Image: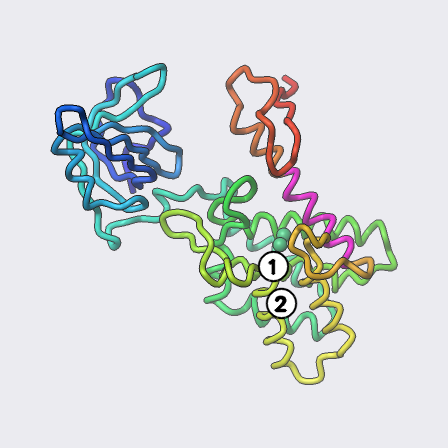
Amino acid sequence: MKSQYVSELKSGHTVKEKFILSKKILKEKKDGGFYAMLELTDRTGSIEGIAWDSVAGDLKTISVNDVVFVTGNINEYNGKLEIVVNSISQIANDEIDPADFLPQCEENIDTIMAEIDEFRTKVTNPFLKKIIDMFFDDQSFVEKFRLAPAAMRVHHAYLGGLAVHTLKVLKLLSGMGDTYTSLNTDLLIAGGLLHDIGKIQEYIYTKKIHTSTRGKMLGHIVIGYEMVSRKIAAISQFPEELKLKLLHMMLSHHGEFEWGSPKLPMFPEALILHFVDNLDSKVEMMIEEIKKHRGNQKEWSDYHPFLEREIYLHEED
Ligand SMILES: [Fe+2]
Ligand SMILES: [Fe+2]
């Protein structure tokens, strides 16, 4: 584990620590030497850096997204903190602890997974129970599921984000099942548990959250559809109508063609899954925006490109 995180750095501090080199701009000085403008990142944030002459020269062999060991001093420049870098060297992959660089879920992930498991016990349909167990009793699946983020940015973009989002969706679905009593609650729970499982393959989450080649080419809707289809094929006599309904929920949960949904939701359980999925991601975007500005006096956020509006940031005392 690191001992100095970006969020704790103050002017005058000496730095000896690992960071991700998240940006690097090498420039030539008028006298012929080099300088480099950098951005150094860990799970708590980013700080700019400046390196001169031979130190800047060392950066020629280091790539953006490499993890580096930096020594230097913190200065305040134009009202912002920056590291004046004295030395920089690349760190080998096996010396990297992902927990240093990726934000993590604030809640205890074991508790989240235990609550998700409680929803599993409510399913009585033997075929839906079987398919859920095939995933959630598989340790290698569970290990990936509990670590995966639910997005690259804006909402649940941290280790454990997928599990946190899935649990919120399940809780919202449970309220919907209580309100609309004619609904098939087993189908709601199965859809809630499985709708985003494709994200375990869509994202890579080691030093930085980014989209895998498979994720870029197929996306989590198609990946998840494939994962569920394959399990259904292995269960003998899985009812055809139930199969179509579950697969339709996988395919339609984004709700609109322009949001990447190949199908519009065509029965109530599918429509509700889409709305609660959408609700949780949007509420989370607003909460995260408010948290980001907590402590400063800003009343309104900048224009939020995903929510397409400004967010009112002030919280009641
Ligand atoms: Fe999704
Ligand atoms: Fe989702």
- Say which quadrant the C terminus sits in: top right
Q: Is residue 245 above or below residue 108?
A: below
What amino acid type should be assigned to the residue bearing mark 1?
Answer: Asp
Where on the picture, by quarter, is residue 270?
bottom right
Magenta segment range? 270-283
Q: Is residue 314 left or right of residue 48?
A: right
Give the number of the disc on residue 306.
Answer: none
| Amino acid carrying mark 2 in the image | Tyr
Residue 133 counted in the magenta span: no
In the picture provided, is 313 more to the left or to the right than 263? left
The x, y position of residue 206, in whole percent, is: 38, 52
Secondary structure beneath dot 1 equals: helix
Q: Secondary structure at mark 2?
A: helix
Tell me where residue 18 sits by quadrant. Answer: top left
Q: Which residue is mark 2?
A: 225
Observer-nearest residue: 134 or 311? 311
On the image, the x and y values in percent for residue 312 come to 65, 23
Residue at point 74%, 48% (across, down): 275
User: Which dot marks residue 117?
Assistant: 1
